[in-house]
Image (spheres, helix red, strand yellow):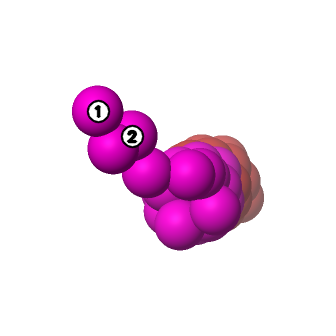
Amino acid sequence: MWKKVLLVVAVVGAAAYVAKRVKSASEERALWHEATTAPDLR
């Protein structure tokens, strides 16, 4: 019983960690895109 609970907690924790890393990478990529794109001076 405890092994199953521990496994579920580990899987949920790993999924949360991966989701956080993906979100962070996406935000970083968006920031770099904004910083390196020429300004629209119209």
User: Of the residues shown, which amino acid type is indicated by label 2?
Assistant: Asp
Q: Position of residue 13 (x, y in %)?
A: 56, 61
The residue pinned by badge 1 equals: 42
> Would residue 41 be found to the left or right of residue 31 on screen?
left
The reply to whether callout 2 and callout 1 are in contact (CB within 8 Å) is: yes
> Would residue 29 be found to the left or right of residue 24 on screen?
right
Quarter of the view holding residue 17: bottom right
Label 1: element kind: loop
Q: Is residue 20 visible?
A: no
User: Of the residues shown, which amino acid type is indicated by label 1?
Assistant: Arg
Residue appearing at x 29%, y 33% in the figure: 42
> Would residue 15 be found to the left or right of residue 3 on screen?
left
Query: For this rendering, which residue is in front, 18 or 41?
Result: 41
Instruction: Give me the C-alpha separation between circle 2 and circle 1.
Output: 6 Å
What residue occupies the far front of the structure in this picture?
Answer: 42
Q: Is residue 35 visible?
A: yes
The residue pinned by badge 2 equals: 40
Q: Position of residue 38 (x, y in %)?
A: 56, 52
Magenta range: 22-42
Q: Position of residue 40 (x, y in %)?
A: 39, 40
Neighbour class for label 2 at 10 Å: few (<14), some, many (≥20)?
few
Q: Position of residue 3 (x, y in %)?
A: 70, 58
Residue appearing at x 64%, y 62% in the figure: 36
Q: Would residue 35 be counted in the magenta stretch?
A: yes
Q: Closer to the observer: label 2 or label 1?
A: 1
Query: For this rendering, which residue is in front, 12 or 27?
Result: 27
Query: For this rendering, which residue is in front, 36 or 42?
Result: 42
